[in-house]
Amino acid sequence: MSMITEFFQNLLAGFAWIIIFSLVVWMGGLVVLLIMELFSPNELLIKEYLWKVWKMLRTIFEWSSYGGIIAGLVMTQTSGEIYSNVMISLAAIILSVFHLTWRKQSKPIRDVT
């Protein structure tokens, strides 16, 4: 029973690492996007800005899950925590499958402009 508990704890930790990394990158992207919008000659339209924020959030979560597969495998080779890093890769594979099915089933992202 402890082996199953450890498996799910490490799997949830893998999901948490990917989500935290995605949120940190997204927050940095928000700062860059806001600065770009503030210094553009056009006026700031909230609807367009929020649409860009949503597209960035979706893209960053998607690419973080794809990159997590490679990063988890590289960290498995370079660090001592093999089991945790394999779980990060497994969580990234699960998230990548989710994102691929979400992208396949959803309509293409359109621009608000």
Image (cartoon, rainbow, N blue to C red):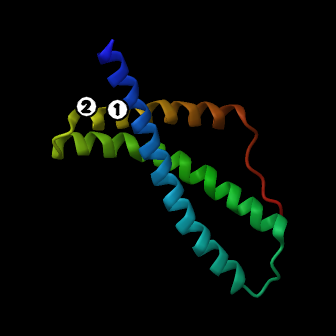
From the viewer's perspective, is 79 left or right of 10? Answer: left
Secondary structure beneath label 2: helix
Note whether 60 is above or below 101 in the view shown: below
Quadrant of the snapshot with the C terminus: bottom right
Secondary structure beneath label 1: helix
Tell me the residue at 58%/74% (across/down).
Answer: 32
From the viewer's perspective, is 26 left or right of 2? Answer: right
Residue 79 in percent (x, y) is at 17, 45
Mark 2 neighbour class, 10 Å CA radius: few under 14, some 14 to 19, many 20 or more: some
Quadrant of the snapshot with the N terminus: top left
Quarter where residue 35 is shown:
bottom right
Mark 1 neighbour class, 10 Å CA radius: few under 14, some 14 to 19, many 20 or more: many
Q: Furthest residue to the front?
A: 2
Tell me the residue at 63%/72% (across/down).
Answer: 33
* In contact (CB < 8 Å): disc 1 and disc 2: yes
Q: CA distance from mark 1 to mark 2?
A: 6 Å
Tell me the residue at 55%/48% (across/down).
Answer: 61
Residue 30 in percent (x, y) is at 61, 68
Q: Amino acid at mark 2?
A: Tyr
Tell me the residue at 67%/55% (across/down).
Answer: 55
Residue 74 in percent (x, y) is at 25, 44
Q: Amino acid at mark 1?
A: Met
Residue 4 in percent (x, y) is at 35, 16
In the picture of the structure, the residue carrying the numbered disc 1 is 87
Note whether 9 is above or below 21 in the view shown: above
Q: Which mark is residue 97?
A: none
In the picture of the structure, the residue carrying the numbered disc 2 is 83
Note whether 1 is above or below 65 in the view shown: above
Quarter where residue 48 is shown:
bottom right
Q: Looking at the picture, tell me which residue is in the foreground, 113 or 78.
A: 78
